[in-house]
Amino acid sequence: MAGNSSKDTAKDIHHSLSIFELSTGEKFMISGSTTNVGGGSVGSSLINKLAERYRAVKYSNYDWATYVLHALSLMMKCTIKEVFGKGGLTKRTSLQLLHSAYNLKQQYVTKIWRKLWKTATNT
């Protein structure tokens, strides 16, 4: 989204939905969203601006949450750290191994990577 306000965000959402409406002939309404404070368009402010453009369902039926992605990330962080160990440049964990293998693979075309892998794993 462009801009730093609920007004700007509602305008951009309205524009994007208008493009879809041209191809489908249907009217699209927003019934829920997640936001964070960093973008400037938050909570009820965004809902009100969407409603002004007839893009939000009735306020009592609108679902919204703030910072929900941060909370989900934290839940996964603890689990991943418990299972795989703490990551980092100097750490030796299974997650770092996967990361390093992926980065190494990106350095070679598929045909050469297969030969290197067969040599390294003796298969």
Image (cartoon, rainbow, N blue to C red):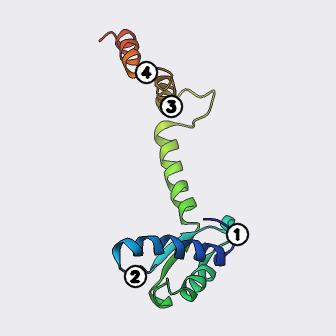
Q: Which residue is identified by label 4?
A: 109
Q: Earlier in the sequence, mark 2 or mark 3?
A: 2
Tag 3: amino acid:
His
> Please, is residue 89 above or below residue 31 in the view?
above
Q: Residues within 10 Å of mark 3 (few under 14, many from 20)?
A: few
Near-viewer residue (3 or 120): 3
Q: Mark 4 is on which residue type?
A: Val
Q: Position of residue 86 (x, y in %)?
A: 57, 37
Mark 4 is surrounded, within 10 Å at the Cα level, by few (under 14), some (14 to 19) or many (20 or more) other residues, namely few
Residue located farthest toward the left when viewing the structure as drawn: 123
User: Residue at 61% across / 72% down in the picture?
Assistant: 9
Tell me the kind of residue under disc 1. Answer: Asn
Q: Secondary structure at mark 3?
A: helix
Q: Nearer the viewer, residue 11 or 72?
A: 11
Mark 2 or mark 1, whichever is nearer to me: 2
Q: CA distance from mark 2 to mark 1?
A: 26 Å
Q: Can you say whether 54 is above or below 78 in the image?
A: below
Q: CA distance from mark 2 to mark 3?
A: 44 Å
Q: Where residue 31 sits: x, y (%)?
A: 45, 80
Provide the secondary structure element on which disc 2 rests: loop
Res. 4 mark? 1
Disc 2 target residue: 27
Q: Residue at x 57, y 35 (%)?
A: 87
